[in-house]
Image: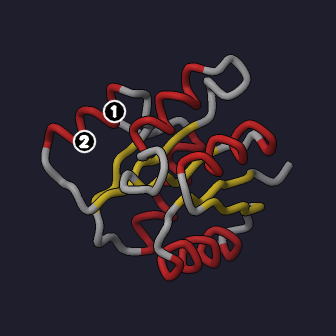
Amino acid sequence: MTKSVLVVDDEASISFALEHLMKSEGYNVTTANDGNKAIEQATTSRPDVILLDVSLPGRDGFDVCQTIHSAPTTCDVKIIMMSAHSRDIEIEKGMALGASAYLTKPFSMGMVAQTVRDVLAGDHS
């Protein structure tokens, strides 16, 4: 069965690039451009992994991560947080809220693809 990825970023160019990358990797892809839409998409489509930007309109990525992981129907969805904020405290906060990985921008598309593969394989140490 084809794995699915939800791309959540309010920057259209980044969202488009990540959507294209994930499709080229063979994943089914949906997108959202704010925190509320991300939660709605996660609930209705139940993706295998979410690429989640931290800085979003409405609800930030930390709140989205916590909300998704506290709901019984989405608590096991893997989340990869993405942010230009690379301070240890932000990374630790994301991981404490249940993120499987945390990527700091700018990142390479190869790094994103490998991180998604690792998270889906259960190797995200």
SS assignment at label 1: helix
Task: Name the image quarter holding residue 85.
Answer: bottom left
User: Could you tell whether 114 is left or right of 91 in the image?
Assistant: right
User: Could you tell whether 53 is left or right of 94 in the image?
Assistant: right
Residue 73: x, y in percent? 73, 23
Q: Which residue is mark 2?
A: 91
Residue toward you, 119 or 66: 66
Residue toward you, 120 or 20: 20
The residue at the point 73 percent across, 53 percent down is 4
Dot 2 amino acid type: Ile
Q: Residues within 10 Å of mark 2 (few under 14, many from 20)?
A: some
The residue at the point 59 percent across, 78 percent down is 16
Residue 71: x, y in percent? 64, 21
Q: Which of the labelled discs sits on residue 95, or is there none? A: 1
Q: Given contact means CB atoms under 8 Å apart, are the residues at marks 1 and 2 in contact?
A: yes
Dot 1 amino acid type: Met
User: Could you tell whether 78 is left or right of 55 in the image?
Assistant: right
Quarter of the image that includes the C terminus: top left
Residue 81: x, y in percent? 41, 48
Task: Name the image quarter holding residue 15.
Answer: bottom right
The residue at the point 38 percent across, 51 percent down is 54
Q: Give the Cα distance between marks 1 and 2.
A: 6 Å
87 up-or-down from 108: above or below: above
User: Could you tell whether 97 is left or right of 12 in the image?
Assistant: left
